Image (spheres, grey):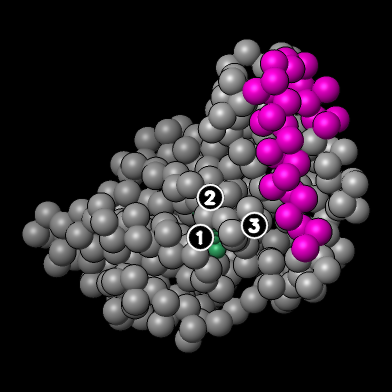
Amino acid sequence: MRTLRSIAELRAALAEPRRFGAEIGLVPTMGAFHEGHLSLMRHAREECDTVVVSLFVNPTQFNESSDLSAYPRDEAGDAVLAADVGVDFLFAPPVEELYPTGFATTVSVSAITGELEGIHRGRGHFDGVTTIVTKLLNIASPDVAYFGQKDAQQAVVIKRLVRDLDMPVRIAICPTVREPDGLAMSSRNRHLDPAERFRATALHRALRTAEAAVAAGLRDPAVVQARARAELTSSHVEPEYLELVHADTLAPVATIDGDVLAVLAAWVGDTRLIDNHVITKNGRR
Ligand code: AMP
């Protein structure tokens, strides 16, 4: 695996495989790899001839500078893990390479970004995401780009971005990878102390509670949400939002008559966690 720092180097490295018709897969990440990231890389490795992983902690998607500075970074460790999975190129540019002096362009998806994470992290969060993803897609020109279902709203926003701007790339959404006790893997989990780590399992239980309620025949989202919310609060986990929304539009559903996305964000101590499950009408995924 080669680590590349500049756009020109990455484009040059991809020119040859592209000439020979190689299928190129891109996995955009912010590093601090865990099994969730590695599963995206494995999917890319299975499906593509050449695999590029970008590692860039994108400053424009953080609304709190303290959150940005606290973001875990371990490029050396990440490089070992990516190489083990068989990644070909790790693209890890400095900030100035992607945001040179005078940078003045924002790519913004309206609708779907003002809800859920958009309310709580600020609209600028998704503008930061869609701008950097557009740049990475332009830089690597992959055939397929891999994202995780863990960030459900981000997945919906990126699919919309690519569709609306006619970007010639397939967006692959890979399932959420979880710890054995159900906690969705996240770079932020390392901020949890042992007691918080234990309480954090309530997020998954809350989503399972919502599933069970739907499986039992409940169709009123407010009732299902209340049951799931009770599971969180009984574990002293403070929900920021917990909603049942349409899986493509992220609009709240009035009644549960098809697949819905149960999405939640919650604070466990000082750590903000998100999770989601797709719930089918009979309650199974
Ligand atoms: P991040 O480095 O947090 O920006 O994540 C990079 C990619 O990994 C995003 O597409 C995430 O949705 C995905 N990802 C993060 N955690 C998980 C997980 N537990 N399971 C699957 N994908 C994940």
- Decide: few, some or many residues near mark 3? Use Cα within 10 Å; few <14, some 14-19, many ≥20: few
Q: Horizontal and vertical percent for residue 20?
A: 9, 59
Of pointers 1 and 2, the one earlier in the residue sequence: 1
Extent of the magenta region: 198-227
Which residue is identified by label 1? Answer: 36
Q: Amino acid at mark 3?
A: Asp
Q: Which label sits in the foreground, 2 or 3?
A: 3
Of pointers 2 and 3, the one earlier in the residue sequence: 2
Residue placed furthest toward the left = 20
Say which of 186 and 8 sits in front: 186
The label shown at residue 176 is 2
Label 2 CB sits under 8 Å from any ligand 1 atom: yes
Is residue 205 highlighted in magenta?
A: yes
Where does ligand 1 appear, by image quarter? bottom right
Q: Amino acid at mark 1?
A: Gly
Q: Residue at x 42, y 57 (%)?
A: 40
Which residue is identified by label 3? Answer: 181
Say which of 208 and 247 sits in front: 208
